Amino acid sequence: MKGVKDPKKFTITILSVAVAILLLFVLYFAIFRPHYEQFVYEKQIEGANEGINYVVTQVLTNGYVQLQVGNETLTLIPYVPEDTAA
């Protein structure tokens, strides 16, 4: 360790930096990442619900909705079952 005046102080500094980096990794994987993944999951569910609500609203107001699926069109209409009890 040429140029280092106090090798013990240098070693303590390097170990302190290593511990700090390891602590940041632990914090990220144990605390921040799970919270972020939960946030993303909730937003995905929210987006899916928004899409479903939009389609249902369009079907109820217009009587149908057309969705593009690749090169084909999918038409959704409300289903009203026949009353077989009469």
Image: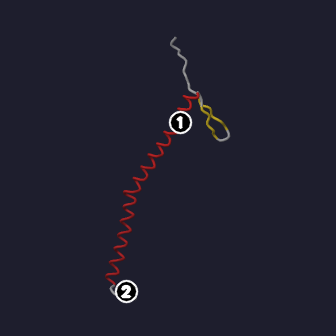
Across and down, in percent, residue 39 comes to 43, 49
Q: In the rendered view, tell whether residue 20 sits above or below residue 63.
A: below
User: Is disc 1 placed on a helix, strand or loop?
Assistant: helix
Tell me the amino acid under the disc marked 1: Tyr
Residue under circle 2?
4
Residue placed at 37% from the left, 56% from the top? 31
**Residue with the most extreme right position:** 71
User: Which one is in front, 56 or 38?
Assistant: 56
Q: Decide if residue 62 is on the left or right side of residue 7.
A: right
User: Which one is in front, 15 or 38?
Assistant: 38
Within 10 angstroms of label 2, few (less than 14), some, or many (20 or more) residues? few
Tell me the amino acid under the disc marked 2: Val
Q: In the rendered view, tell whether residue 16 sits above or below residue 85.
A: below
Q: Decide if residue 46 is on the left or right side of residue 61.
A: left
Across and down, in percent, residue 82 comes to 55, 18
Across and down, in percent, residue 70 comes to 65, 41
Residue placed at 59% from the left, 29% from the top? 64
The tag on residue 54 is 1
Coloration mode: secondary structure
User: Is disc 2 placed on a helix, strand or loop?
Assistant: loop
Q: Answer with the quarter of the image where residue 24 lies.
A: bottom left
Across and down, in percent, residue 42 comes to 44, 45
